[in-house]
Every structure is written in structure tokens, then in C-alpha cells.
Image (cartoon, grey):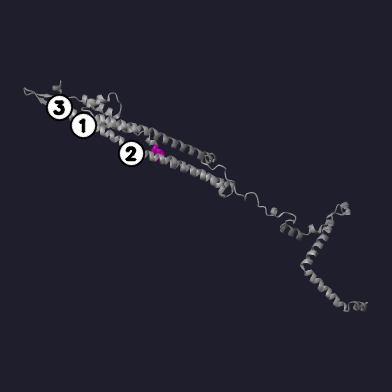
């Protein structure tokens, strides 16, 4: 038999075995051969695993299941749990690369970011602040309109009455010109004429002092009447920014509370609340700035009106002084007697 093997190959049997071993090792190291071998072994292992998983009739009758080596091995179970499941070749690639959904997506911004929309979405405290500031702004412009008309009419009337008073010869003539007028200048003239009548045959200096005190009170009363309503402008101008700041602080505090409840630091969650809070500050400035400007304009206009009343009061005192001097003037008659000018006119 050995001789026949040697005769067929022409080589000793141990050399033939060595060559077969080397050829087998070389083919096993080749990638193509390894892939083919893996597929063949997988196809062979699948029926074996299915057969092993299917219990035998005898074991089912006895109530005992056949042990599964693939499931029962702890090492294999740990390895399968640790390794991630790879996508099947038939699964589309876009499904494997699909972005995750859930809390990772940014929060959607509100649809309406206009001032009216932010007002509707604001908390109740901020809404109350905004409504109060809107009413304050309405009061500011109402006072501006009413006082502008009042100041213009009063200034025109004071200028006209001052011209009438300057053109009059005596205080009584000026009183007749004004008639039943109730303007401040007419009241000045009436007060001076009444004091002169009540102080008849008294010392002229005392009459002038009493008349000056009475005129100053009338002038101050007219100035106070004209300043009514301007105090509201001063209050709004000084407090509206702080009221708006209160609404801003409250809105930002509510926004941070929302961040704590949502457990996210996404800017889209915080931005609407901060915008609503800043809207309160903006409304405070809108209410305060016009109030301060209008108050300063009215202060200058009222000061000019008081100056007109001061000029009228000075003119009334000059008329009173001249009238008193006329009453004290004496004329000499033919027989040498001194007769007051008032008696000579009679």
C-alpha cells in the first residue's frame, strides 16, 4: 500500500500531508475564503439552533425542556446585551440616521409677538401694570389738551384786559369798561376800587398797602387755579418708570420660575416672558416721558401767565395811586380858601 501511494504521487506520504496542511492554512487566511466559510457555517448553524430550540416530543411529554446552549450560556447573553444591534441590510439608511425626537427639539416660539399679543400672553400682574400705565398715558394727554386750551384762552384774555386797563384814565373808568366780567384782571380792578371806597377819607398810604395785599391774594388764587391738573403730570412723570420696572421684575421672575418648572435652559422658553416684562418698562417710559415734557411746558406757560397778572396788578395800583392823589389835590379859590378837587368838581 505504501509503495502504491509513493508510486501515485511520486513523493513520500508525509510530504503530501505537509503540503495539504500548508494549502489549508493559506486558504483560511484569505478574506474571500473566510467570508464563504462564515456564510456556510451560519447557514449550517441556523437549522441546528432551530432544532435545539424546538423541544423534543419526549421532553414535552415528561414536562422537561431541552437545554438551549445559546440562551443558557451566561457569556453569550452578556455579550449580546452589551453589543448594540446593528441595522439589517434591508433597512433603509435614512431610517437609521433619523434625528431623535423629544425634549431635544427646541420649543416652538409663540405665533404672535406683537405688543398686543405679548399683552394677551402676559401674567395677570403684568397686565394690571400695563393697563394702569395706559390709563396714566391717557390722563396725560387729556390734561395736555384741556390745559392747553385753558392756558391759551386765559393768556389772550389777560393780554386784552391789560390793554384795556392801560388805556383807561381812572380806576373807575376801567371798572366801567370791564362791566360784569369775571376775569382775573377785572377782579383786580373791582377789588382795588372797592377798597378805595371803603377807605374813604383815610390815609392814602394805608389804602395802597391794603389794596396791594388784596391784589396779591387775587393774583395767587388765579395762579393756583391755572396750575390745577399739572400735579397729576408731575406724579405720572416721576412714578410711571418705577411702576413699569415693577412689571418688568415680576415678569422676569415669572420667566425664571417657568425655566425651573420646565427643566430647560432653552432661550425660546425664556424669551417670550422677558419680552412681555420689557414691554411693561417700555409702557412706563411712554407714559412718563410725555408727562415730564408737558409738565415743563405748562410750568413755563403758567409762569408767563402769572407775569401778565403781575403787570395787571401793578397797573391797578398805579391807577389807585393816581386817583388818591387827585382826591387830595386842593385848589385855591378867589377868597383864599383851599377846596379839594373832588368838591370843586361837584
| Residue 104: % across, % down | 62, 51
Mark 1 surroundings within 10 Å by alpha-carbon count, few (fewer than 14), some (14 through 19), many (20 or more): some
Q: Is residue 195 visible?
A: no
Mark 3 surroundings within 10 Å by alpha-carbon count, few (fewer than 14), some (14 through 19), many (20 or more): some
From which residue to which does the magenta span run? Answer: 233-237
Residue sitting at 53 percent across and 44 percent down? 273
Q: Which residue is mark 1?
A: 318
Q: Nearer the viewer, mark 3 or mark 1?
A: 1
Work out how far the residue at label 2 is from the one at label 3, CA to CA, in angstroms: 42 Å
- Say the numbered circle drawn on residue 328: 3
- Say the numbered circle drawn on residue 85: none
**Among the 4 quarters of the image, the one containing residue 12:** bottom right
Q: Main secondary structure of the magenta part?
A: helix
- Check disc 2 and report its element: helix, strand or loop: helix
Residue sitting at 80 percent across and 70 percent down? 27
- Check disc 1 and report its element: helix, strand or loop: helix
Q: Earlier in the sequence, mark 3 or mark 1?
A: 1
Q: Which residue is mark 2?
A: 300
Left or right: residue 161 compared with residue 83:
left
Name above or below for residue 312 compared with residue 293: above
Left or right: residue 184 compared with residue 48:
left
- In this view, the residue in front, 202 or 328, is 328
Q: Are marks 3 and 1 in contact (CB under 8 Å)?
A: no
Q: Earlier in the sequence, mark 2 or mark 1?
A: 2
Amino acid at each position: 500500500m505504501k509503495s502504491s501511494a509513493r508510486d501515485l504521487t511520486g513523493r513520500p506520504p508525509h510530504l503530501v500531508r505537509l503540503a495539504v496542511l500548508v494549502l489549508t492554512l493559506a486558504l483560511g487566511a484569505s478574506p474571500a475564503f473566510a467570508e464563504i466559510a462564515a456564510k456556510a457555517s451560519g447557514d449550517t448553524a441556523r437549522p441546528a439552533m432551530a432544532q435545539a430550540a424546538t423541544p423534543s416530543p419526549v421532553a414535552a411529554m415528561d414536562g422537561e425542556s431541552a437545554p438551549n446552549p445559546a440562551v443558557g450560556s451566561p457569556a453569550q447573553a452578556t455579550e449580546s446585551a452589551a453589543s448594540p444591534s446593528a441595522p439589517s441590510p434591508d433597512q433603509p439608511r435614512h431610517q437609521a440616521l433619523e434625528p431623535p425626537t423629544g425634549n431635544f427639539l427646541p420649543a416652538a416660539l409663540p405665533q404672535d409677538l406683537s405688543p398686543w399679543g405679548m399683552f394677551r400672553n402676559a401674567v395677570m400682574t403684568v397686565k394690571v401694570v400695563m393697563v394702569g400705565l395706559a390709563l396714566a398715558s391717557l390722563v396725560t394727554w387729556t390734561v395736555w389738551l384741556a390745559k392747553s386750551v385753558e392756558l391759551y384762552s386765559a393768556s389772550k384774555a389777560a393780554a386784552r384786559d391789560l390793554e384795556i386797563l392801560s388805556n383807561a384814565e381812572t380806576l373807575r373808568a376801567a371798572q366801567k369798561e370791564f362791566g360784569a366780567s369775571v376775569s382775573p384782571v377785572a377782579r383786580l380792578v373791582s377789588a382795588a376800587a372797592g377798597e378805595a371806597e371803603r377807605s374813604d377819607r383815610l390815609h392814602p398810604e394805608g389804602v395802597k398797602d391794603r389794596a396791594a395785599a388784596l391784589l396779591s391774594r387775587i393774583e395767587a388764587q388765579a395762579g393756583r387755579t391755572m396750575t390745577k391738573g399739572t400735579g397729576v403730570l408731575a406724579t405720572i412723570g416721576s412714578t410711571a418708570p418705577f411702576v413699569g420696572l415693577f412689571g418688568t421684575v415680576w415678569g422676569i421672575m415669572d420667566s425664571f420660575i417657568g425655566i425651573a418648572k420646565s427643566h430647560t435652559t432653552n432661550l425660546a422658553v425664556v424669551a417670550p416672558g422677558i419680552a412681555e416684562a420689557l414691554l411693561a418698562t417700555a409702557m412706563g417710559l411712554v407714559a412718563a416721558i410725555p408727562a415730564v415734557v408737558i409738565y415743563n411746558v405748562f410750568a413755563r406757560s403758567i409762569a408767563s401767565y402769572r407775569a401778565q397778572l403781575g403787570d395787571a396788578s401793578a397797573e391797578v395800583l398805579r391807577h389807585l395811586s393816581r386817583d388818591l392823589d387827585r382826591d387830595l389835590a386842593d385848589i385855591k379859590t378867589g377868597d383864599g380858601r383851599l377846596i379839594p378837587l373832588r368838591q370843586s368838581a361837584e
